[in-house]
Image (cartoon, rainbow, N blue to C red):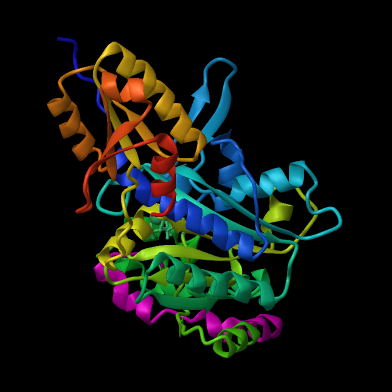
């Protein structure tokens, strides 16, 4: 036998038995985004490596350790599988001049790639829905993005999510804070781990994001950004809080929220659950006013977030959300030549009537076909033998309900199915 070829570690197949949950999720998300006027944008999965380096930041986990980048040997281009969607979205918006004239409410959805250690809730190919509002500068759009999330959790049957919000201030206040952080961490250089030491001068904010338990106490006592915050950023943050309170959206302020990407400023937020163990952040985002310019466009403010679909599906299950498997309306069993011809006609007739029909293929005894009909989950089996075919009727056998079987014509079948 040939050697078995397996899927790549950390990259999952989504099998038919799980696909209905994805459908439910995707359909709900589409309805939800339409409610708020967000429009879909689809960008390629592969981009120039430089796009992500420039936007996410050279000294970040994603770019340093997690990005699938490679040289396309056919023309020596340096390419990368997208690790997230914001950079691609911004690139496309600039390339097609979408911000000319009016701001944009956009969303995308699809696979993202990060070379991380696979574990529950953390994969190398995972899926995100990302929502981006470009060209808006005020805290009102930040509030809209957060408030719409709260509605989605309800639509998905999720409860118990905690909202954490923070602010990173302007780039000037970050620069000031950065200098103070470097000074502080230099004083405690002996207690920094290898990553932190390396990032001390290039990206000290990243140290605050460290999960190393031995560093938590120096991180705890590090200078706080709030003390370096500029006035307009304070007002922005206050207004956001005001709108959230008005709308009854509960939040906690977390001024240690750093986020794993460099492009954020001002508002940052995360939706977190305790129900999924260590991988508890299901949705995260914030404002990124400098990114459009950084990627080569005319300066434009922006704000957005991305959610992890695998984690949200897992959370829906934890919350007891049941999503019914789709089942066919009827399964047609048939035996005999005349019966087969009529079975084909019956199947297409019922499909014209919007019924979901499985036509048995592959022959076999009535008994074995009936077993398959039952296993399909169909509501009715339609039995067609040569005498049914001759009379242009079917024997309708209810598979789930305690009603008598009966010989009926196809119109009666379609009426019966429509009254479900
Ligand atoms: P984490 O702190 O869990 O590594 P992150 O800050 O790297 O997350 P973002 O880049 O903000 O994540 O992506 C937004 C969301 O995408 C996350 O909140 C999470 O739900 C999901 N996500 C990120 N990385 C993965 C992954 N490797 N596998 C599954 N989901 C992921
Ligand atoms: Mg990460």
Measuring 37% from the left and 42% from the top, which residue is drawn there?
A: 115
In the rendered structure, does residue 189 fall within the stretch colored magenta?
A: no
Q: Quadrant of the C terminus?
A: bottom left
Q: Height in image: 233 above or below 22?
A: below
**Where in the figure is residue 83, as x and y percent of width and height?**
48, 45
Main secondary structure found in the magenta portion = helix
Measuring 26% from the left and 65% from the top, which residue is drawn there?
A: 318
**Where in the figure is residue 297, as x and y percent of width and height?**
77, 50
**For this rendering, which residue is in front, 348 or 122?**
348
Report the side of 185 relative to 277 (left or right): right
Q: Height in image: 71 above or below 224?
A: above
Q: Quadrant of the N terminus?
A: top left
Measuring 68% from the left and 77% from the top, which residue is drawn there?
A: 140
In this picture, which residue range is highlighted in magenta? Answer: 209-237
In the displayed orientation, state which residue is furthest to the front: 391
Task: Say which quarter of the image contains residue 162.
Answer: bottom left
Q: Height in image: 388 above or below 252?
A: above
The reply to whether residue 295 is in sight is: yes
Report the side of 239 relative to 416 (left or right): right
**For this rendering, which residue is in front, 60 or 182?**
60
**For this rendering, which residue is in front, 198 or 254?**
254
Task: Say which quarter of the image contains residue 145.
Answer: bottom right
């Amino acid at each position: 036998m040939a050697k078995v070829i397996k899927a790549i570690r950390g990259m999952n197949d989504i099998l038919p038995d799980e696909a209905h949950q994805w459908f439910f999720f995707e359909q709900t998300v589409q309805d939800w985004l339409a409610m708020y006027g967000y429009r879909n944008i689809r960008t390629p999965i592969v981009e120039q490596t430089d796009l992500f380096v420039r936007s996410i930041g050279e000294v970040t986990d994603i770019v340093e350790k997690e990005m699938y980048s490679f040289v396309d040997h056919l023309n020596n281009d340096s390419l990368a599988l997208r690790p997230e969607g914001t950079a691609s979205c911004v690139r496309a918006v600039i390339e097609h001049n979408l911000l000319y004239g009016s701001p944009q409410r956009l969303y995308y959805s699809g696979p993202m790639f990060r070379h991380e250690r696979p574990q529950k809730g953390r994969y190398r190919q995972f899926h995100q829905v990302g929502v981006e509002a470009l060209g808006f500068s005020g805290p009102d759009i930040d509030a809209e993005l957060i408030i719409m999330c709260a509605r989605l959790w309800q639509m998905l049957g999720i409860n118990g999510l905690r909202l954490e919000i923070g602010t990173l201030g302007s780039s000037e206040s970050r620069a000031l804070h950065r200098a103070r952080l470097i000074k502080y961490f230099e004083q405690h250089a002996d207690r920094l781990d290898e990553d932190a030491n390396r990032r001390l001068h290039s990206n000290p904010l990243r140290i605050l994001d460290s999960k190393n338990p031995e560093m938590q106490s120096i991180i705890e006592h590090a200078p706080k950004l709030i003390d370096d915050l500029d006035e307009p950023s304070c007002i922005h943050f206050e207004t956001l809080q005001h709108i959230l309170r008005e709308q009854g959206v509960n939040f906690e302020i977390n001024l240690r929220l750093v986020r794993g990407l460099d492009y954020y400023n001002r508002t940052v937020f995360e939706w977190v659950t305790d129900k999924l163990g260590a991988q508890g952040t299901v949705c995260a985002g914030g404002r990124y006013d400098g990114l459009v310019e950084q990627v080569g466009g005319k300066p434009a403010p922006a704000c957005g977030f991305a959610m992890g679909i695998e984690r949200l599906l897992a959370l829906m299950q934890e919350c007891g959300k049941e999503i019914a498997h789709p089942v066919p309306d009827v399964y047609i069993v048939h035996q005999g030549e005349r019966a087969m011809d009529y079975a084909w006609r019956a199947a297409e007739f019922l499909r014209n009537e919007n019924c979901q029909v499985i036509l048995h293929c592959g022959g076999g005894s009535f008994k074995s076909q009936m077993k398959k009909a039952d296993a399909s989950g169909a509501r009715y089996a339609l039995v067609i033998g040569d005498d049914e075919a001759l009379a242009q009727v079917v024997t309708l056998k209810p598979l789930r309900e305690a009603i008598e079987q009966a010989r009926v014509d196809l119109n009666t079948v379609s009426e019966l199915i429509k009254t479900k």
